[in-house]
Image (tube, rainbow, N blue to C red):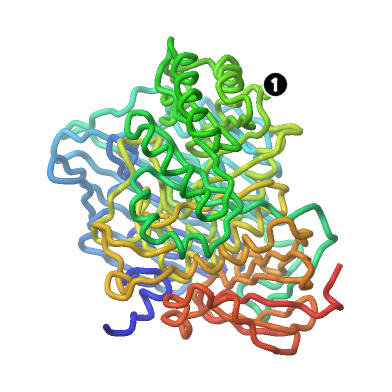
Amino acid sequence: MSDPSLAVRLTGTEEIVPAPRVLKAGKLSAELDNGNLRAIRYDGIEIIRAVSFIVRDKNWGTYNAVIEDLDVKEEGDRFTVRYAASAGDDGQTFRYTAEITGTPRALTFHGEGEGVTDFLTNRTGFVVLHPVNGVAGEPVTIEHVDGKVENGRFPEVIDPLQPMMELRTLTHEPVEGLKVICRMEGDTFEMEDQRNWTDASYKTYVRPLALPWPYTLKPGERIDQTVTISVEGGPASSSARGDAGAVSLSLGEAGGKAPRIGIGLSAGEIEATRAKIETIAGLKPDYLVYMHDPRESGEAELKAAAEIAGEIGAEAWLDLVVTEVEGFADEVAGVGKTVSALGDPFVVVRVSPAPDMKATLPGSPWPPAAPLDELYKAARSAFPKAKIGGGMFSFFTEFNRKRPPLTDLDLVGFTTSAIVHAGDDRTVFESLEALPYIGLSAKEIAGEKPVTVGPSAIGMRLNPYGEAPMANPKNIRQAMNRNDPRQRGLAGAAFAVGYHAVMAEKGVSAIAFGGTTGAQGVVSADHDWPQPYFEDAGGVFPVYHVERALAGMTGDTYLPVASSDPTRVLATAAKGEAGTEILVANLTARRCSIVLPASMEKARILDAEHFDEAAQNPWFFDELEPVSGTKIDLDAYGVARLVLSASGDQ
């Protein structure tokens, strides 16, 4: 057995992703990434997150365009990019050409094309992303397609629908004194609040969702669109930008208890989980969430899930999919009788109509489903000993769009995935920027009811927007993957620390991570998808150690941790009998220096150097070593488990 490559240790895949090319025209810069633009900056300030010409299929999946004849020229204070591209599959093809021009004060992206065949699509054309930081809650001037101009604001609380419609131009100031004008021509554009899906952006797109979709682009039916970004003025004051120096952490005031930590279980994982039961038990999760869909499993699986929860010392929670519309009460009562005969093992029962597991886009009617208020009453009658939960088994998006009546609920919840719209590393970690707004918005919806999240992971456990998540047989970074390779790499561990840090700070009461042995799991098992290194070596994924450490914080006094640069480093902490413990994660692929809020007494580092040792030793993170000092260096996606000196206690 050979040692895993650095790529596998970091991201779980051998896929090589070329670094984007940085284009510059004076103070204006942009990154060219597979023909599209990202991180558009002026004087180092991000003014637009992305401008992309995208081609999607009938399930909202985005095709990876094949680019030909790429021609890039940089001449003084000007750059130009030209190329031809094709997108599609064995059944259909769309071809287009693109031209990008950058000058010190303006950037223009023009795209035009047509179907080679009849081309069935849900969206083909430009998408513009405005970033969240410096934008959320701030003013924007809106010019509509009819020429009408009005003043508005980018929403702070996440808008469930489309905050801006019939758009031609959006003008905002990311910092005082710098005006950014985004003009979109060639179709009618509208905006959705993409934070619903944990994307850290507001997305302006074609075409309006009120129009029929999917729609067919006929050969000869041309698309011709242009996006122009221009700037006026400049920053009123200068500030440090970019990756400058060490990141400093500071402890906030002691709050309530650290969130409870759970783990998900599906029917398909039961056999593999039983085979790894001792290792799973080592996680010491506070609760286990089993999803019961009567279309796929029955009484035997219900019993097995309850037994597994008992064997690992966790509370048993049940997510019950309700398939009947007219006969929902009888269906719920029937499951209640089955559960009662098993001895009422489920402490929490969350219920959701099956139709709500698929998305209903704005303007479309909700499909027939059990009425939520009556469903929750039926659940309380059928499971009198359990706490009853509502919300969505799908994502925050659906939770926000179909808000549950709260009267008969003890708690509410939803799940997330970091790769709904894109699968690259940057998008995954940028999603952590959106989580504070999800926490804020969820608390507003829930009122006084506790908010629970999960089971969640980077990858998708279900796909509300198509038939199913992508199978990912090539083990690549890809939107809507069930099997995301980073789940097995250090990136997955760092992401989990960041996820907990943000959700805990926003008052989420319980966080369930993805699974046991499956695609969003923590322990390797035989599966029909690639698992480099683990296929031969077995063992536990890096995220296992993070989840185990977080579970150990359950019930301790939670301490929020402020980061001077949360795009690079996030941390979460709690004070218990053994002192103040903190988990620190480097969210980047570059080495990072971190200044701690107090001196260290003990430490353990999970990084590429210790990857193999950690994979073969489930107790790796328990083996803390005496250290001192107030500064640590973490390599790419490294995670540190630290015990701080008494001076760090709050």
Q: Quadrant of the C terminus?
A: bottom right
Find residue 291 and report its horizontal and vertical position in percent: 45, 38
Q: Is residue 177 visible?
A: no
- Taking 541 as reference, is 373 above or below it? above
Q: Residue at x 85, y 60 (%)?
A: 253
Q: Residue at x 33, y 59 (%)?
A: 35
Find residue 247 and report its horizontal and vertical position in percent: 69, 76
Answer with the quarter of the image where residue 375 lies: top right
Q: Along the horizontal axis of the image, is 604 left or right of 590?
A: right
Answer with the quarter of the image where residue 432 lies: bottom right
Residue type pointed to by label 1: Thr
Disc 1 is placed on an element classified as loop
Q: Along the horizontal axis of the image, is 221 left or right of 226?
A: left
- Taking 257 as reference, is 411 above or below it? above
- Taking 617 as reference, is 495 above or below it? above
Q: Quadrant of the N terminus?
A: bottom left
Q: Along the horizontal axis of the image, is 470 left or right of 496?
A: left
- Taking 438 as reference, is 503 above or below it? below
Total number of numbered discs in the rendering: 1
Residue on which the image places disc 1: 407
Q: Residue at x 40, y 76 (%)?
A: 9
Find residue 152 and report its horizontal and vertical position in percent: 68, 34
Q: Residues within 10 Å of mark 1 (few under 14, many from 20)?
A: few
Q: Is residue 458 visible?
A: yes
Find residue 560 and report its horizontal and vertical position in percent: 76, 61
Q: Residue furthest top?
A: 326
Q: Residue at x 52, y 55 (%)?
A: 312
Q: In this view of the protein, which residue sits in the foreground, 67 or 547?
A: 547
Q: In this view of the protein, which residue sits in the foreground, 9 or 400?
A: 9
